Amino acid sequence: MTDRPRMRDHERERDKDHDPEANSPVVGTTRPPLFGILGPGLITGASDDDPSGIATYSQAGAQFGYGLSWTLLLTYPLMSAVQIISARVGRTTGHGIAGILRRHYPNWLLQALVFLLVAANTINLGADLGAMADAFTLVLPGPPKWLLIGLFAGICVYTQVFLQYTRYVSVLKWLTLALFAYFAAVLTTQVDWKALGTGLFFPVLQWNKDYLTTVVAVFGTTISPYLFFWQASQEVEDIHTYPHRHRLTRAPRQGEAALHRIEVDTLVGMGFSNLVALAIVVTTAATLHKSGITDIATSAQAAEALRPIAGEFAFLIFALGIIGTGFLAVPVLAGSAAYALGEARKWPVGFSQRWQEAKAFYATVALATLVGMVMNFTSIDPIKALYWSAVINGVASVPILVTMMLIARRDDIMGQFSIGKSLTVLGWIATLLMAITVAAMAVT
């Protein structure tokens, strides 16, 4: 095995010169390209559209047509606020969410939330690996599913463990381009724009089990705990990667540029995420729902159902998008679990560390991926497993959101960078929404 290479001095200077915060227009220097500004927020938002999320959005479009498109309009400001708060916690304190919990909250709360997060993430990434293999066999039949799952899992583990952090992040950023497949899919279908406008802005709400369950699934898929942990931890990673950056509590003069960069990054990333989700709902509404196909269990099933209705091209780009989003989401799921567990156990953590320096962290990444992979070869129903991961995520999201909101308002933790009124209001609305979601899930 080869070591993860350390950054050389000239590489550090290069990264400093290209640091989007150092070149922020807020501090009066050269405005960096938008793609240079985008980082943790873009990757976090894009990973939210993973294969299991694609299945949820496909089911929403197939079963209710354009009728649930309003949910993505509603969740955009809420998920943006929550992710901005997550990023600010990491950038301000220099610690991830689990690290803050360990320092300021009871140990039982930390251990319970980390356990729920790791369990849900492992189940979710296992389902994503299976979906990637299913999609591949739709495009190129022949290779056995077990081989594809093992290959995809191995690629994900290798890139996380052995790629230099800056290159690894670059790979994830380029993988977000796979999501454009769903915009292309929309262009190949005949969309009822009037019905879409009605669904977005003048929805007709239904009070029945199927409708409420799907609303719960969309909310739970869009606002997920692993995204909070990942984006906060990635901000901490960037502090270690760019030499001139320091936690804001120690370098408050960096605050204006840092918060501007976080806001742009997150708003664009979450907007991109929700537009992709809307594209999936629109595509399946215009094809599957219109043709009377209303029951979709997996993302691969959604792609296969598109083939005779929308044509070979729409089917192909939809299926390839599943594989691309899987390569993006699996590392985020494994990585956020490793960050949370590592910070809770006081391990050295971070992808900027060489694997010899953070063996337990990298072992968690590999083990979570391995367990998820093995799940595909057991008698466990992947659809039921995915359902239970959604349940676990929903249950865990409420106390995590409550705790995170309390953290973000504490001056002894955030200093002068505690969140203001607008983020506070939106954050608590998101928390209340998730609490209602969990209650609805229990009832339905």
Image: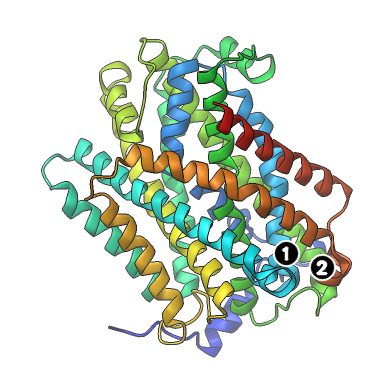
Marks 2,1: beta carbons within 8 A: yes
Q: Identify which residue, 264 or 382, lies in the foreground.
A: 382
Question: Residue 115, how many percent across, how many down?
Answer: 51, 61
- Quarter holding the C terminus is top right
Q: Identify which residue, 410 or 112, lies in the foreground.
A: 112
Under circle 1, the secondary element is helix
Indicate left or right for 388 with 149 as reference. Answer: right
Question: Residue 278, how many percent across, how many down?
Answer: 54, 29
Give the Cα separation between the discs numbered 2 and 1.
Answer: 7 Å
Q: In this picture, is 325 found above or below 283?
A: below
Indicate left or right for 389 with 345 as reference. Answer: left
Q: In the picture, residue 90 is in which quadrant?
A: bottom right
Indicate left or right for 223 with 255 as reference. Answer: left
Q: Residues within 10 Å of mark 1 (few under 14, many from 20)?
A: many
Question: Residue 15, how many percent across, how many down?
Answer: 59, 76
Question: Residue 422, how many percent across, how many down?
Answer: 85, 45
* Residue identified by numbered label 1: 89
Q: Is residue 297 visible?
A: yes
As drawn, the label of residue 414 is 2
Q: In the picture, residue 58 is in which quadrant?
A: top left
